[in-house]
Amino acid sequence: MATLGQIIFYSMLVIIVILSFFIILFFSLAFSSKTHRSSNVISSSTKPVANLGEDQLLSCYLNTQTSQDKVTVTWKKTDLTGLVYFYQNGAPDLTNQASQFSGRTQLFPEAVVTGNVSLLLRNVRRSDEGKYTCSISSSKGGGEVSIQLRTAAFSAPTFTFSNGTLSAEAVRWFPKPSVSWLNQTENILNGSSTFTENSEGIFSIFSTLLSVQVSDTYSVRIENNLVMALSEATISGSDVSWRTYFTFSAASFRPVGSLYVIIMTSFLWIYYVTL
């Protein structure tokens, strides 16, 4: 026969399961509704990382294969007086463009007619970081999408090999990264790194690994909270060849995951109380 504690426990468990179902259903419907309202306008990258001093394309386009007529495009940036870019009647109208974007933005008219209104932002600055909204209105649809632009400085390292020492040098990194050396089995090795910061806060890196073996492959990983560069360097005689791969942070808030944690915490608390 079940004890009073077991009855309470299983009763509360049933209540939690039922409440969880309705809460998850509510969030799912809310997000589905939001997605449906803005589904006509999408971006291939809503959290891009731009390399300071270089050009960055902010992706925005209508989710359609048909040609568009009477396209109006508005690019805005949160907390900015003025617009980033405005396009109407087949041509840009930059009367109300914010001065910090003057001469640094561009749409491509031949792409606009297909619904692609991606914005080219030239010579990215730290002040460009923030939330952008791309709005499209046309004869065949419209909507908007938000893009969170993040800025960093990153460069691939170059390698040299001499007297058993493998050296890597990367000239542009921000924020300040960490550096790790690894062998072919991905074990961390004991390398040495120095950082030099210039007047703009950009770091250059010089890192060395001693007692390396000819014909072996070593990796150096340079990373901060936004960008990771993983380079593989192979030594052949007195020469060294390498290749570098970049990956970017895509941090996002997941309410369903957070909800799961809350539910499980509640479950464990009830379990503890009924013991």
Image: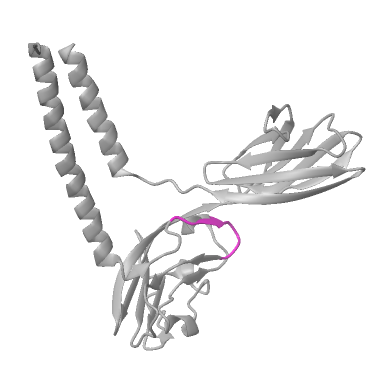
In the displayed structure, would residue 231 be above or below residue 84?
above
Instruction: Tell me which corner region of the image, top left, top right, bottom left or bottom right, holds residue 24.
Output: top left
Magenta highlight range: 47-55
Question: Where does the C terminus fall, quadrant-wise?
Answer: top left
Judged left or right of residue 121, residue 32 is left
Instruction: Tell me which corner region of the image, top left, top right, bottom left or bottom right, holds residue 261.
Output: top left
**Residue 88 visible at all:** yes
Q: Position of residue 225 (x, y in %)?
A: 52, 42
Name the residue rendered at 17%, 14% in the picture: 273
Q: Position of residue 188 (x, y in %)?
A: 68, 29
The verdict on residue 52 being magenta is yes
Name the residue rendered at 70%, 39% in the picture: 220
In the displayed structure, would residue 10 be above or below residue 112?
above
Closest to the observer: 79 or 172? 172
Judged left or right of residue 221, residue 192 is right
Question: Where does the N terminus fall, quadrant-wise?
Answer: top left
Residue at the front extreme? 1
**Residue 82 visible at all:** no
